[in-house]
Each structure stands twice: as structure tokens, then as C-alpha cells.
Image (cartoon, rainbow, N blue to C red):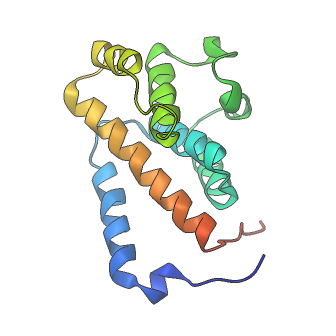
């Protein structure tokens, strides 16, 4: 894979705007685990190795179990490992990430409204949007996974 631009260095204003979204996410009511589940699942769908390496490591540091991380790509088949809230968050993550298929469905949105406040639903949507943007930056600029 060829080396490409470093967005942070080439267009620092754009990178700063993305960092602003991350700063916003730190103020939300989403737990660290919820945020990492969103980031990992979207990164799996988008094939972003850089973000997968970062966010699986972060999730473990926040107390997430390796087993739940391993099962995340098949969370529907392993639903008993995830709370009802996490299942809705994961469904929202998939539907928003795969927006060209159908987008956030009425069914998933209704389930989210049953479990979360409107503000919390908005925070979930923004978390999904943010990681999708980071995935697109990492994949299009060929960010390499650092070797430990």
C-alpha cells in the first residue's frame, strides 16, 4: 500500500474540525464502552484496520471483554452477550453506516426511542457519523496500523 497524505499535517483545519467532534463525544451521556462498540462495529463494516486496532485496544482498557469484541461482528447471533440498549446501538450503527441500503429504519428508530431520550438518540447518531468519517479518512489516506 502506497504512502498517502497526512491529513493532520496537510489540512490542519479539517483535522481540527474532526477533533471537535471527538471533543463533543466526550461530553455525551454515552458510556466509554458504548462509544467503543460503535467505533469497532462501524470500523468492521468499513474495513478500517487502523481504527479497529485503536478501538479494540481502547475497549479493553475500558473493561470490555475480549469475548464480546470477538463476537461483535456476529452480535445478532450472540445477542445474549449484549444488553438490549447495546443491541439497539449496534443496529443503529449498522444501519447508519450502511446508509445506502435503507438508512436508519423506522423499526430501529422506534426501539431506540423506547430505550433512550431524544438527546441520547442524537448522541448515538453523532457517534456513528463521527467514526464513519474517521474510517473514511484512515482508509483513503492508507493509515497504517502501528505494530506493538
Quadrant of the rendering where the C terminus is positioned: bottom right
Give the x, y percent position of residue 35.
45, 41
Nearest the eye: 112 or 148: 112
Tell how many labels: 0
Instruction: Quadrant for residue 2, please give it.
Output: bottom right
The residue shown at (27%, 31%) is 120
> Can you name the residue that lies furthest to the left here?
118
Instruction: Quadrant for residue 30, please give it.
Output: top left
Is 133 drawn above or below residue 138 in the view shown? above
Is 71 drawn above or below residue 5 in the view shown? above
Residue 77 relative to residue 11: left or right: right
Is 145 drawn above or below residue 2 in the view shown? above
Give the x, y percent position of residue 67.
73, 28
Does residue 68 show up? no
Residue 62 relative to residue 111: left or right: right
Residue 13 relative to residue 60: left or right: left
Nearest the eye: 67 or 39: 39
Residue 70 relative to residue 26: left or right: right
Amino acid at each position: 500500500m502506497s504512502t498517502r497524505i497526512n491529513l493532520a499535517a496537510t489540512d490542519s483545519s479539517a483535522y481540527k474540525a474532526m477533533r471537535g467532534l471527538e471533543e463533543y463525544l466526550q461530553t455525551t451521556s454515552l458510556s466509554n464502552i458504548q462509544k467503543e462498540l460503535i467505533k469497532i462495529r462501524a470500523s468492521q463494516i468499513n474495513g478500517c484496520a487502523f481504527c479497529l486496532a485503536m478501538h479494540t485496544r481502547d475497549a479493553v482498557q475500558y473493561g470490555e471483554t475480549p469475548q464480546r469484541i470477538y463476537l461483535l461482528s456476529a452480535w445478532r447471533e450472540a445477542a445474549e452477550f449484549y444488553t438490549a440498549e447495546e443491541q439497539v446501538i449496534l443496529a443503529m450503527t449498522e444501519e447508519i453506516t450502511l446508509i445506502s441500503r435503507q438508512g436508519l429504519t423506522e423499526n430501529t428508530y422506534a426501539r431506540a426511542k423506547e430505550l433512550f431520550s431524544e438527546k441520547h438518540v442524537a448522541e448515538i447518531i453523532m457517534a456513528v457519523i463521527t467514526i464513519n468519517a474517521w474510517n473514511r479518512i484512515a482508509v483513503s489516506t492508507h493509515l497504517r496500523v502501528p505494530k506493538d
